[in-house]
Amino acid sequence: MANTATIEINGQKNEFPLVNGTENEVAIDITKLRSATKGVITIDPGYKNTGSCESAITFLDGEKGILRYRGYSIEELAEKADFLEVAYLLIFGELPTIEQLEKFHSDIKKHSVVDDDVKKILDAFPKSAHPMGVLSSLTSALTAFNPSSVNVNSEQDMYNSVVRILAKFPVLVAWTMRKKQGLPLYYGDSSLGYVENVLKMMFKQPHEERYIQNPILVNALDKLLILHADHEQNCSTSTVRIVGSSHAGLFASLSAGISALWGPLHGGANQAVLEMLEAIKEDGGDTKKYMAKAKDKNDPFRLMGFGHRVYKNFDPRARIIKKAADEVLGDLGVEDPILDIAKGLEKEALNDDYFVKRKLYPNVDFYSGIIYRAMGIPTDMFTVMFALGRLPGWIAQWREMRLKKEPIGRPRQLYIGETLRAFKTIDKR
Ligand code: SDX
């Protein structure tokens, strides 16, 4: 293949270099397009065909349903690694030695205290506040209590910010849930592993002398967090990158990413899936009615948890989560009719021409909520759990962008408004 692409505009030919990734993906480098063509740009709403960066963190192949973090398959990582190992891998590029992992965890534990004044901010929210709005606000507020986390011009400064947010974010997640439940807010327990600590802060009841860890929940949450840890340039990660590209601090960039993830077309889908399955259950399990709604162009309803911008095959994470849902509910002895409705819906959709033609398969959000529900996590906290998993991926992508000194993100546009016109003064009474 030639290593250039030729674009001919009004008879003038311009050549642009082709760049190749390590997985044989090819991109046209159009960094010189405007100057070479006196102002011509490309346009691509939703960036469906446009790459924003070169990245070495996550590779996915939507046609083949492949997902790898730093070259390791998601299947192997979900089975053999733990979440903190995967966080280290995503952020620093290599799996940690035991010494590196222990130091990483020890550095994180040193920063697990969240300033008590953050509770005053939490108190100001009405109980009806959605946890994602609370989490985004508290994450941004952390900057005020950790001002040194803004100017991260050295790798050491960046490392200090990274361990701070990995330490404090789980506390904010637990406090956000427990505040809504009217339960006391606990700090972390540094004697525990990262995921065990999250579960204890979320679920220890006031009357309990000790919180007894349930290994089924620990393993399930660890696996879910790994499966959500990164997904290349998705909507929320691109948000974290573009906010960070203005040299806003890490916590402010993450806060923006949380808001982007909240949307029901993105991370908010896991909550929307459960609400949809509940509605179908209330409706007597009438999946056909909801399939018809999903296909009706005049109906805004979509089959939540189905379809994906990149995957035109099964989302590999959905396969793993579906299997885990069976195992967790079985191990916990939970009978949940919602799981059967989900499976029935999946079966129908996978045999329905509308979905098959559009290559719409279950995505990461279709089954995850069923496990969160079995774990006793409230539905409106599902996307917060997604954010907890995605945190290391956001950090890794933000760090890569800053270390590569990428320019501030500032897309162009095609103006389609009024051309020049004179102002007409009206007779003001
Ligand atoms: C996540 O990007 C990531 O990597 C995200 C994520 C991550 O890890 O960060 O994987 C997490 O966000 C997963 C997606 C969760 N969202 C949902 O489950 C919401 C339901 N899905 C859709 O809204 C939709 O599939 C999107 C938003 C996920 C993708 O939308 P696209 O790529 O913009 O595709 P599209 O809207 O142009 O759809 C193409 C066609 C359309 O029909 P036609 O106009 O061709 O006739 O497929 C139809 C759509 O109407 N379609 C659906 C559908 N999804 C797409 N029809 C019914 N139900 C659906 N779910």
Image: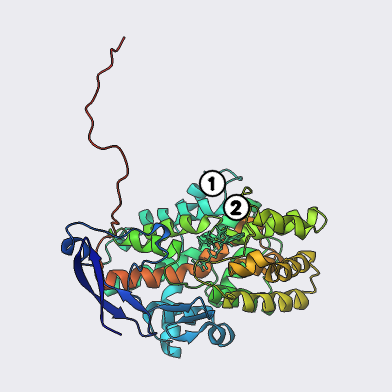
Question: Sequence-wise, which precedes: disc 1 or disc 2?
Answer: 1
Mark carried by residue 219 = none
Horizontally, residue 114 falls left or right of residue 130, namely: left
For the N terminus, the image quarter is bottom left
**x, y (%) of residue 251?**
38, 60
Tell me the residue that label 2 is attached to: 179
Q: Secondary structure at mark 2?
A: helix
Residue 169 pos. (x, y %): 48, 64
In the image, ligand 1 is in what quadrant? bottom right
Residue 177, percent from left and from top? 60, 57
User: Which residue is farthest front?
Assistant: 11
Residue placed at 28% from the left, 16% from the top?
426
Image-quadrant location for residue 286: bottom right
Task: From the top left corner, tell me how far across and down residue 45 is, in percent.
Answer: 40, 57
Relative to 249, does residue 65 appear above or below in the rendering?
A: below
Q: Work out which quarter of the rendered image holds the C terminus and state it.
A: top left
Three-letter amino acid code at disc 1?
Asp
Binning the other alpha carbons within 10 Å of mark 1 as few (below 14), some (14 to 19) or many (20 upward) gives few
Q: Which residue is labeled 1 in the image? A: 123
Question: Is there any visible trace of residue 408 in the rendered image?
Answer: yes
Nearer to me, 16 or 6 = 6
Calculate the distance from the C-alpha at mark 1 to the C-alpha at mark 2. Answer: 8 Å
For the residue pair 76 and 143, the one nearer the viewer reads as: 76
Could you tell me if the residues under marks 1 and 2 are in contact, i.e. CB atoms within 8 Å? yes
Q: Residue at x 76, y 78 (%)?
A: 331
Residue 15 image-quadrant placement = bottom left
- Check the image and report above or below for 176 versus 308: above
Q: Amino acid at mark 2?
A: Lys
Label 1 secondary element: helix
